[in-house]
Amino acid sequence: MGDNKMTHEPRVFMTDDGRHAASLYQMEPPLEPGDFVFNIDQLAGSGFDTLFYGASLEGGVVMYDSQVAPIWGDNVTQWTHPVWYRASRNIKQLISDGHDPLKLLVDRAHEKGIWFFCSNWVNFQGSRREQSAGLGRTTDWVYEHPQFEVGVEDDPRAAELDDKRFNFLHEEVRHKRFVIYEEYLSRYETDGVDLDLCSFSPFCRFDESDKLAPLMTAWIADLRGVADKAEQAQGRRKRIYARIPSHRQAWRVLGYDVETWVEQKLVDGLIVLAGGPEAGVDHSHDVSEAVKLTRGSDCRVLSGMSVLLAGQLEQYAMSRTMYAGASNAYAQGADGFGFCDAHWGPQGWPWGEAEYGVARLLGQADLLATADKHYHARATGRTKTDWTPGVAQRLPRQLVEGETIPVELYISDDLAHWDQQGRIESVRLSVRVSSIEASLNELRVELNGQKLGDDLLDLNDLGYRLYSKGAIGPYGYIYEFDLPATYHPKQGLNKIEVTLDKRDKHIRSPFELYAVDCEIKYRLHRNFRREPLAY
């Protein structure tokens, strides 16, 4: 697994909710079919071979001519959101003109050689009519059944979760979602479905997961039966992919018997995430549990990455960070890689040359080996998925005098090999600390047990810096270490330890370990400089 042989299965995927970076929000009605399928055309020849398309919303409404669920806005008499009003008008206008939006997308994807999966939140998110009636995203059935919500629970892991998410222990809840997936598989010539089992989870109270496990397995088994029947009727293979957290213990906590799903061939693929869709950039998550489980089976493993960096200068991860994620995935044995956010468009929408340049390498493990990479420790603050087993603790974290903060980075690069070839241009480890004044404090940084001395250090003063859009925050310093070969990170999991040995006593502001990064740059050939002349 993880090689570059030609494959007839999905390898590099894009998730698209069909709304934000698409015509439904960004184009005024009326739409022509060509307007609506532009996002399929955008993928053609891009390097992405698979689209996971979000055809429904969290409150149960859909964005196509469904026979089993209401269309977005069916129960709205007075809109309170102008963009969602536009989306509903666009959908209904296409349908009234005789076009089923979902069929348009499926047909265009196959015409362009793109695998097309209907993606959806498996669970419902509850709401109150008095709060969201003008948004159109919630069905009357969801409004009318608050008794199906999980509700408030004492478990501390639930503190960040929405207690209005629905409880899958109720047969009515399972059935309402089942018929939508059944429609995706049977009524449309999709290549399969993508079960988002990470959003709005757990699907029950934390103390009920043992009860959920057999029901969840039975639900997927029934869906497998639908897929097999549709496959025979359409003469087109129907795949079931499931999005799950990376850690086996997380499966237990959520009530997902993934081992049985694989053993009984209920799923064709696992999309492994670092906790959930709100995890932020995390390319160091461990997919090995899923790889080991599926070894010797026909079940594929795709590594899913969020590309939301949410930095001061960049909203999306840099290309070098995406290459780090893809390279890590293949190094661990994954069959493919892709983006799990609602959309991707670092330069806006539609895509430009930069996006196509990035996407070209994402499925090429051998070419990624010497692509520049930027490894970035998770640094987005607390999210709803931080309780998930196996999820690394996030930065920022407060630095206390005398205490050490460990940070792990999985780095797939074989630096020893490429250094022998003269291909390494630079390896730089950066440790950013907020509020600190470097000359008044003593900070110690170790990489895999080796202390990084001042002879390697290049300080980057952010005590107060203005740039074109204002001041850079937070204040502080970046401790940057240019690493010679004897200090290079190893291939695999690396441990960075940051210790505040001595703290300035004259300032009360807390110091935080704000970010840890490792940037690797390669040469095309030994002594082949990127910029050979200065003038």
Image: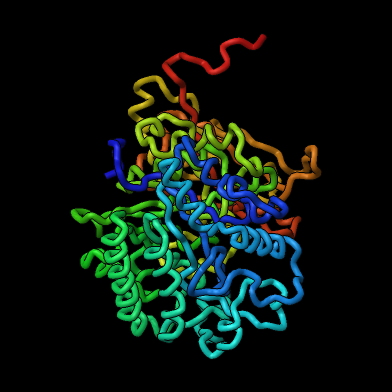
Q: Taking 279 as reference, is 181 left or right? A: left
Q: Residue at x 29, y 68 (%)?
A: 224
- Which x, y percent locates residue 382? 58, 64
Rendered-image quadrant of the N terminus: top left
Percent from the top left, x then y, of residue 30?
Answer: 69, 54
Asked if 336 appears above or below 413 in the picture, the reply is: below
Q: Nearer the viewer, residue 460 or 98?
A: 98
Q: Residue at x 51, y 68 (%)?
A: 66
What residue lies at 60% left-to-right and 39% top-to-bottom? 351
* Vertical placement of residue 248 versus 29, above or below: below
The quadrant holding residue 92 is bottom right
- Is residue 149 in sight in this rendering? yes
Report the front residue among 420 and 358: 358
Question: Measured from the top left, where is residue 114 in percent x and y?
Answer: 42, 45
Residue 296 placement: quadrant? bottom left
Vertical comparison of 472 with 203: above or below: above
The residue nearer to you, when weighing 114 against 110, is 110
Q: Is residue 124 above or below residue 120?
A: below
Q: Quadrant of the C terminus?
A: top right
Residue 280 rendering spot, x and y as whole percentages: 55, 55
Q: Can you name the residue that lies furthest to the left here?
A: 296
Can residue 409 be seen at all in this image of the molecule?
no
Q: How is the image coloured?
A: rainbow
